[in-house]
Image: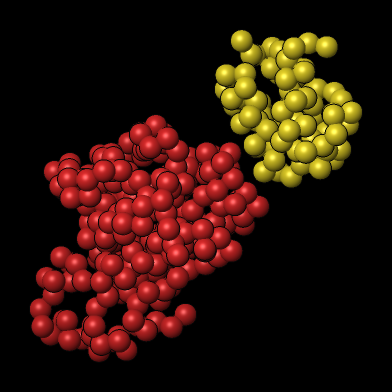
Chain colours: A red, B yellow
Amino acid sequence: MFDLTGRKALVTGATGGLGGAIARALHAQGASVTISGTRRAALDALAGELGERVHVAEANLADKESVEALVPGAEAAMGGLDILVNNAGITKDNLFMRLKDEDWDTVLAVNLTAAFRLSRAAVKGMMRRRFGRVVNISSVVGATGNAGQGNYAASKAGLIGMSKALAAEVASRGITVNAVAPGFIESPMTDALNEKQRGAILGTIPAGRLGTGAEIAAAVVYLASDEAGYVTGHTLHVNGGMAML
Amino acid sequence: MSDIAERVKKIVVEHLGVEAEKVNENANFIDDLGADSLDTVELVMAFEEEFNVEIPDDAAETIVTVGDAIKFLEKNAG
């Protein structure tokens, strides 16, 4: 089940905890993986760990030209692109009334506009090959909202709407488009929380623990697989019961 | 019939799975040949590939019949 041998994947934000876990999981199922991120050293370290079937593509997703070079580069390196995982995401949190235009614009550009441009580019080749998987990494916050994250929540909700619209357009060509919405996941960001903050968060999660990157990656592997070919336009919530949607 | 016309018709027949005799110059991709809007995008992509030419979006919108495609490509291809 969920064998990805011969499939070619592009994962953005692969230097982050979540993106790294997703790249590892796709690779472990047999896929070739192009890992993209802003930090060259971290990309090279991950590539070294994975060994074969890995390509590195440094990219700044806030930059239009950098985004537009990514899919053609990945297609050239791997000889095609079957799986696109739009994982890259940033936060610039602030109370809504204090949110600056540039904090709004940057978060939307990286989290949503880059995913739009990459999906638009990737779907072209996928249509020709009559197979494709686009997986957009959203967030529980995209469905529930969260104080202090107006820009981030908007971008993550935007990914869900965009996934559904694109899914409807390309379903007849063997391409599925889905979202995965993680809840609270163990990461450098959550490691930085103090005991009190941690306790407060855990109190809202029926599972009583944070999720792991591997648990999110498993959802991505499923949606990328041949077996998930009839699942499209869906948002798979992986949040320990924090929000049952 | 020009070489370009032949190649255009071959692409249309292959892509839309229609009978060759239906693919005349007056045939409208959507009304006569059963294409959906996504098919028309794919046809334009196929023409671009076959003739190694870029078809801008505003030009693509004017290509609604087989004859439109042939005329555009005769003017702009190789």
Q: Position of residue A107 (x, y in %)?
A: 32, 54
Q: Residue at x 55, y 48 (%)?
A: A131
Q: Position of residue B17 (x, y in %)?
A: 78, 38
Q: Where is residue A43 drawn, in percent x and y? A: 20, 45
Q: Does B26 sit above or below residue A136?
A: above
Query: Would residue A34 be found to the left or right of residue B41 on screen?
Result: left
Which is nearer the eye, B59 or B42? B42
Q: Nearer the viewer, residue A34 or A192?
A: A34
Question: Is residue A158 in view?
Answer: no
Identify the image quadrant of residue A148. bottom left
In this image, A154 relative to A55: left or right? right
What residue is shown at x 54% (from left), y 56% (from top)?
A: A176
Q: Image quadrant of residue B33?
A: top right
Q: Residue at x 33, y 81 (%)?
A: A240
Residue extending furthest right? B21
| A37 shown above or below A224 | above
Q: Quadrant of the N terminus of chain A?
A: bottom left
Taking depth in this image into account, of A153 and B31 the one nearest to the observer is B31
Q: Position of residue B73 (x, y in %)?
A: 69, 17
Q: Is residue B65 above or below residue A230?
A: above
Tally of numbered tags? 0
Which of the pair A174/B27 is nearer the observer? A174
Q: Is residue A152 visible?
A: yes
Is B46 left, or right, of B20 in this rendering? left
What's the residue at 25%, 87% (across, down)?
Answer: A208
